[in-house]
Image: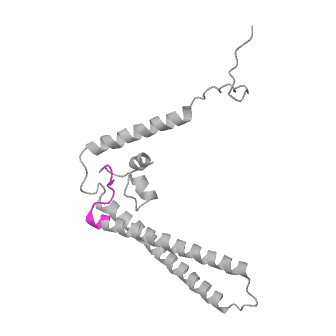
């Protein structure tokens, strides 16, 4: 007995459909994301904190940590700007005979990288300054999304954060 084969209008046999694969990894990821969002929404229903959950000693510890990072970031910006000045001076001192177009392109790309690094460090300094402001206002350590306390481990690793790890996962 012959099996029926579907034929396309061009007269070629139609390929068989492949069986669908299970999406276990993607499904578990989606369900995990839904669970995290549910936790964030539940936390958002709880009363929001208005004062820092950290003690005065802990706030002083984080202030010192942030001030140290702030100082290093400012030094990095100054070093990067000095490199930019050196790069500009060096490009002005090169003569036309010893300077190749490819060298000019490389130098321009290096300067562009330095400008981007300066901008990134300046943005980081802004985050640190806002964290110092929150410490002064006694609102440091409160998640801006859920209104609940941010874990001390997260604050130790990312002291300028404004978002708890649960809220950050829900944002993705």
The boundaries of the magenta stretch are: 134-146
Q: Residue placed at 55% from the left, 78% from the top?
A: 80
| Apparent side of residue 19 relative to residue 123 in the rendered image (left or right) | right
Task: Assign the N terminus to one quadrant of the image.
Answer: top right
Query: Where residue 150 sits: x, y (%)?
Result: 36, 52
Q: Residue at x 70, y 15 (%)?
A: 4
Asked whether, in this view, residue 8 is left or right of residue 117, the answer is right
Residue 103 coordinates in the image, percent (x, y): 71, 80
Q: Magenta includes 143?
A: yes
Q: Assign the magenta stretch its main secondary structure.
A: loop
Which residue occupies the extreme top position in the image? 1
The residue located at (32%, 60%) in the rendering is 140
- 8 on left or right of 42: right
Residue at 68% x, 25% y is 16
Please tell me how many numbered marks the rendered image carries: 0
Magenta-span inclusion, residue 151:
no
Position of 107 with respect to 129 (left or right) is right
Where is residue 11, by image quadrant? top right
Residue 123 position within the rendered picture, expressed as x and y whole percent measured from the top left = 44, 69
């Amino acid at each position: 007995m012959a099996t029926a084969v579907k034929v396309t209008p061009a007269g070629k046999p139609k390929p068989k459909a492949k069986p669908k694969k299970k999406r276990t990894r993607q499904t578990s990821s989606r369900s995990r994301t839904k669970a995290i969002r549910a936790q964030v929404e539940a936390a958002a229903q709880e009363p929001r904190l208005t004062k820092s959950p950290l003690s005065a000693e802990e706030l002083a510890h984080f202030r010192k940590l942030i001030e140290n990072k702030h100082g290093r970031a400012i030094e990095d910006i100054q070093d990067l700007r000095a490199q930019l000045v050196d790069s500009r001076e060096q490009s002005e001192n090169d003569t036309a005979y010893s300077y190749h177009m490819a060298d000019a392109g490389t130098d321009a790309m290096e300067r562009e990288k330095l400008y981007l690094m300066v901008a990134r460090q300046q943005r980081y300094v802004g985050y640190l300054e806002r964290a110092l402001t929150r410490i002064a206002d006694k609102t440091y350590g409160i998640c801006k999304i859920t209104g609940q306390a941010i874990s001390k481990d997260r604050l130790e690793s990312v002291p300028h954060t404004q978002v708890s790890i649960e809220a950050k996962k829900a944002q993705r």
